[in-house]
Amino acid sequence: MNISFQKLKGDVSLHLAFCWKMTIRAKSPLTITDHLIPELFYDYFFIKEGNIECVDETGRTKYELPQQALKPIHTHPLVLIFSSPLVLYGARFFLTFAESFWADHPGANSFLAQTWVRQNTKDLQSFASQVIEHVRGRQTRRNPYPMLSPDLEESDWLVHYSPRHKRRLYKATFGLSRKELQGVRNIHAFLEQTCDFASQSPRIIQHVNPEVFYDQPHLNHTFKKMTGFSPVEYFEANSILQDNLMSASYNEISSR
Amino acid sequence: MRFPAGNIEFGVIHQGKDERMKYKKSKNDIVNEYIENLEKDITPLFLEIRACVLSAGPSFNESIKWKNCLVYATTKNHIQTVVGTGKVSLIFFEGTSLEDKYGLLEGDGNKARTMRIHSPDFNKKALTDYVKQTLKNETQRGKK
């Protein structure tokens, strides 16, 4: 099996973190199971070759992904089943993308069928320029200022709104409450650490941030609910797309 | 440093004024970014180990996991590289199934074993053997 992953830097003014292309080729056709865990990014997928089946065990649904789809924020794990050969293009957007999305709202926990690029897209450069052109022509500002800081702190301009109204605003913009967004953020605060589990047995406890989780059982419970794995199981699990997207995203965030 | 023959793209890391390090570029851009951002003190050792692993297991695909670990995988993860201060640790996820003729695998867990490497004069024969055994075991498991 031969896997390649290419990445192209995005455009921050369009909330675009980066565009990518993943190719999986094998001598004989095979299916590969990939696990997606919740992240605070919006992903646009364009399946150029092959197909992808999505299994949502929480929602107990199984469906084939449309050729072009936008994945909003998910609060539970998803399983993607790739069939090779696969040529998949993608664009990853920051959370703030939701505040400039042109349709009603991107919602949460479900894919939105979209058509942003042409079928005959040849390479990553061409994919990226089509995505940029599409987003630039349609993005609309929903609010006068961003609602949240990168650390998910509420912006000052929301201070005079009632909690009920703010809940409605969050739901209308992100499809989720601020608490749910923070839950996803907390898992990544744990994952972003450089965990050295090379010692004789993994010691998760040394990486539990007391400001985020009460104790290790609290981390384990939240982690399992959100990712479907315990931290150690996740450490060993194979997830081609998720691993690549996540490490590329951490690089983008740290370089912002 | 030996690389498998073929049409290979090489990357160059600028270590100092006159010092340049060539390495076989990965098919994964994120791995190349990761290598280019490594601390210059550990880069030669890291590249030496990587070349040895890829030469013994050319079917490996590379990716970065958990922000800072290079993983060698086929249809599943097999070896994880963790860079520490002055050392590189290789975690063999199925380490208990390896025959340790060289006595270099550490750990007492149920599955994983770790090989710690501190200098470029490490036992390449041993690492090659562990990598080949890892891939052989996978093939045998697939046949069962």
Image (cartoon, grey):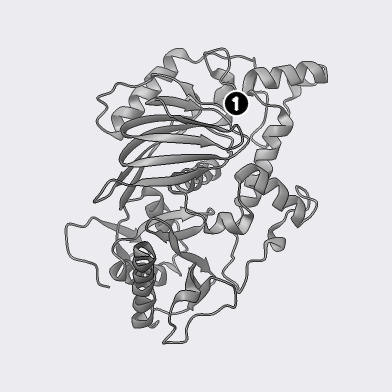
Where residue B72 sits: x, y (%)? 40, 61
What secondary structure is found at the residue carrying circle 1? loop
A153 left or right of B104?
right
Where residue A48 sits: x, y (%)? 30, 31
Where residue A158 sits: x, y (%)? 75, 20
> Quick one: which residue is furthest to the front in this view?
B144
Question: What residue is shown at x 67% (from left), y 44% (from top)?
Answer: A225
> Which residue is more in the foreground, B131 or B65?
B131
> Which residue is more in the foreground, A21 or A223?
A223
A104 left or right of A185?
left
Q: Please tell me whether residue A97 is drawn above or below residue A199 in the rendered image.
A: above
**Three-letter amino acid code of the residue under disc 1:** Ala
A69 left or right of A153?
left
Q: Chain of mark 1?
A: A
Q: Please tell me whether residue B42 is drawn above or below residue A78 in the rendered image.
A: below
Identify residue for label 1. Answer: A108
Where residue A168 sits: x, y (%)? 73, 17
Question: What residue is shown at x 56% (from left), y 69% (from top)?
Answer: A198
Badge 1, how many Cα within 10 Å: few under 14, some, many 20+?
some
